[in-house]
Image (tube, coloured by chain):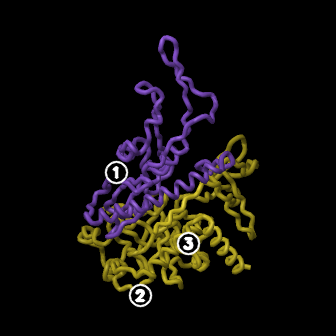
Chain colours: A purple, B yellow
Amino acid sequence: SANASPEFEGRGGEELGSELANTLYRVFSSDKSIDLKSLCINPRENCWILYVDVLLLECDGNLFDAISLAVKAALFNTRVPKVRVLEDEEGSKEIELSDDPYDCIRLNVDDVPCIVTLNKIGHRHVVDATLEEEACSLAGLLVSVTSKGALTSVRKVGKGSLDPESIFEMMETGKRVGKALHAALQKILDEEESLGTSRQKVGFLG
Amino acid sequence: MAAISMRLPEFRKAVVPSVSRGDEKHLVLPGDTITTDTGYMRGHGTYVEDEKLIASVAGVVERVNKLVCVRPMNTRYNGEVGDIVVGRITEVQQKRWKVETNSRLDSVLLLSSINLPGGELRRRSAEDELAMRDYLQEGDLISAEVQSVFSDGAVSLHTRSLKYGKLGQGVLVEVSPSLVKRQKTHFHDLPCGASIILGTNGFIWIYPTPEQKDGDAGGFTTSTEPVPLSDREVISRLRNCVVALVTQKLMLFDTSILYCYEASLPHQIKDILQPEVMEKIVLETRQRLLDLEG
């Protein structure tokens, strides 16, 4: 959104937006990331479609990491209402949504990958770069890691070049950091879940 | 290994206002009524509605005889003659450079206002004009003094002293100009091992203390020698301290930054940016400053 940075005013943020969308497509391209079969209502007929909308409110570098964490947390929080299929005499099926707001199914996000961006500055690389650090780095590697350490996609960003050995090093660091990131995120999501209705609801400007 | 800490969102704690305030300042928010007396002239930051004088910006009310104006807290830099500023070159034009100083208009640095390398005093010729890019390029940081202010508010700078000029290796922190206290000197050599330039425009430059003090080249050559690790740590710690002071809205001057540095020594450099540690350090700094005053 234009709130994030003056260059996103009007159509300015479109290029970045499409880049983010394409990256997310690639990251989730593996069919093991999210269990789509659980979203099925009637085989070959009806199913739930999940849409994920991301709105950038503030931008200080390392967008992809933050967005992937937000997507994973949002999917964890999603509650899909349970659906009953009623068969009519003629054979036409009717779909009935349950009225109870708490009667829902939760998605399994164990295999949802998280993105880790490694920016190369000089001869070393840094994780979680701020906007100033990103301005100093010419090239970077974007790896998406699942909680078990499996890579789903690797992409090079930036206009500089990367040495093949440093690519290996960066992938190893990315895997390590990714696993730690998943562990920390899962812990905090479980903590928030356990708070239930007593947790504080804080808005962005709070 | 990577220490990743995540936390749930919490409401931000309101910044505690400092207790000792001798003179009560009349603070207003946009929309607050300043006065209902119609005898006043309205200045900047005010407007008249229904015979009431209302503030349009958040700040302090200043009254000079019959003129009432509101000086905003968070505003762009307004140049005054004699201020020290730190700026970044944005354009190289015919006989001058355009410098970005966080003000409404870009500041101007005329070719005739700089010290030529070698310290010569002569008329600037056409060759000097063509060689401008050799001295200062787009993206360079300079420290300069305000020579004059144009009628439209643009500021004209000069670097006519050996202590001003191009800045070499260091860290820049951008803060609001209203947080930098106006003092006698803005160049400080802190005893912790680094030097700091507190630009009145809100650009704070932290750099390693140079060894030789004479400054033979007139401030245009910058050393690219690698800075030792201990100096780098001091500079990072200072930078985090400045960020902590700014978040807690404390005025920046050499004593406050020094006290904050000393208060932060027991913590690791990266921990200073955590909200709880920040509060603790700034509270201690505030306490020491109050003790110093009273």
In-image side of B133 versus B31 (left or right): left
Quadrant of the image occupied by residue A169: bottom left
The residue that appears at 58% across and 49% down in the rendered structure is A204
Q: Position of residue B146 (x, y in %)?
A: 47, 70
In-image side of B216 versus B266 (left or right): left
**Chain for numbered disc 3:** B
Q: Position of residue A190 (x, y in %)?
A: 58, 52
Residue named by callout 1: A153
**Chain for numbered disc 1:** A
Residue named by callout 2: B211
Residue A21 visible in the displayed image: no
The residue that appears at 64% across and 50% down in the rendered structure is A194
The residue that appears at 52% across and 70% down in the rendered structure is B270
**Chain for numbered disc 2:** B
SS category of the residue bearing label 2: loop
Q: Residues within 10 Å of mark 2 (few under 14, many from 20)?
A: few
Q: Amino acid at mark 1?
A: Ser
Residue B250 visible in the displayed image: yes
In-image side of A98 versus B214 (left or right): right
Residues indicated by labels 2 and 3 sit on the same polypeptide chain: yes
Q: Vertical placement of B241 versus B54: above or below?
A: below
Q: Position of residue A55 (x, y in %)?
A: 48, 44
